Amino acid sequence: MSDPVPAPQVHAAAAIRILDATSNRATEALRVVEDHARFVLDDPHLTEQWKRLRHDLTAALSPLSPSLRAECRQTQHDVGTTISTPSERQRADLNDVLSANLARVQQALRTLEEYAKVPLVPFVPDAEGLSAELEAMRYRSYTLAAAMEVTRSSQDRLQSVRLMVLVEGQAEPETFEHLVTDLFAAGVPVIQLRDKHLTGRHLLDRAQRLVALAKKLGVLAIINDRADIAAASQAHGVHLGQDDLSVAQARRIVGPQVLIGVSTHSLAQAQQAVIDGANYIGVGPTFPSSTKVFDHFPGPELLSEVAQQIRLPAFAIGGIEPSNIGQVLLCGVTRIAVGSAITAASDPARAARELLHHVGQAIA
């Protein structure tokens, strides 16, 4: 009778079987999620992120050579191949497919992380390093999964929102209320309160007035910069600049379900806003503006890049008016954020209706 195989070798072979089977499960599920980002969301940026994670996983497990994995593989004797549940055979819709495979990715990465800790020398010289790398990938998958869900839900929540008007608080509250009421009556779906001069107390007053009117009419009220004012007034959202709070910091103040927008001035900033969990982005400045001074204008070229790469709702901003809105719409961005072109017009409501008409024609 042959000598028994030493226990350490038995354990190593079992661990390699686990890593082999689980890595297959992880990469298969990653491909399903990648295809959802590619074909359902039609999002090149998120598709690339999932593809990169899948390739990074393959590279991390490269010390386990194909021949080593094949030698330890025993699919025909795997008791797990005959175990299944009814839910595994059914998927309610495309989002159900996504949810199931996101869970499979994360569970598989956790299994890989744990069993990679088992000493497999000389097969895996740095088991501790591999486990840490797999842990980092698992956290990446959580972040990307959140970005997928926020992109999908934000598309739903902002589907009909094509125009955002930036309004200052005005010297008198009655003047502010009159302007806001007229704009909402003209069909403006969201107003952003943006005022750098009012005191905190007066800004909160305007925010509360805006929110009350918006909720009464079933439209949206967003506060620029001030997450605290947005939270105190129970606004629908807060808009952040690159030098303001991060999305994560603002989220801790305003809580869940509140929209968070981020101003972006480059494709990299727009891509980062997606990963950070923003609900929408402002992209620009597109043209010179009378309300804000910029040293650099990325212009319509940035709008085209964002439209090609990102499916998170994006608003073109900066100097947009009836004379140049055609250039914006040709870039593929069909949401606009406008300030003085409307608020400084002799008839703001009419100016808003005109811009809404232009956007409506583009998406018809």
Image (spheres, rainbow, N blue to C red):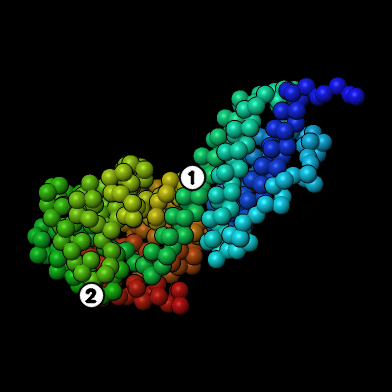
Q: Residue furthest right?
A: 1
Residue type at mark 2: give it: Ala
Please determine whether, in this image, residue 15 is positioned above or below residue 320: above
Numbered badge on residue 143: 1
**Residue 207 appearing in the image:** yes
Q: Earlier in the sequence, mark 2 or mark 1?
A: 1
The residue under the point 22% across, 55% down is: 234
**Residue 291 appearing in the image:** no
Q: Residues within 10 Å of mark 1 (few under 14, many from 20)?
A: some
Using the rendered view, name the quadrant where residue 113 is placed.
top right
Q: Is residue 176 left or right of residue 223?
A: left
Numbered badge on residue 162: none
Numbered badge on residue 185: 2
* Percent x, y of residue 146: 46, 50
Spatial CA distance of label 2 from label 1 is 39 Å
Q: Secondary structure at mark 2?
A: helix
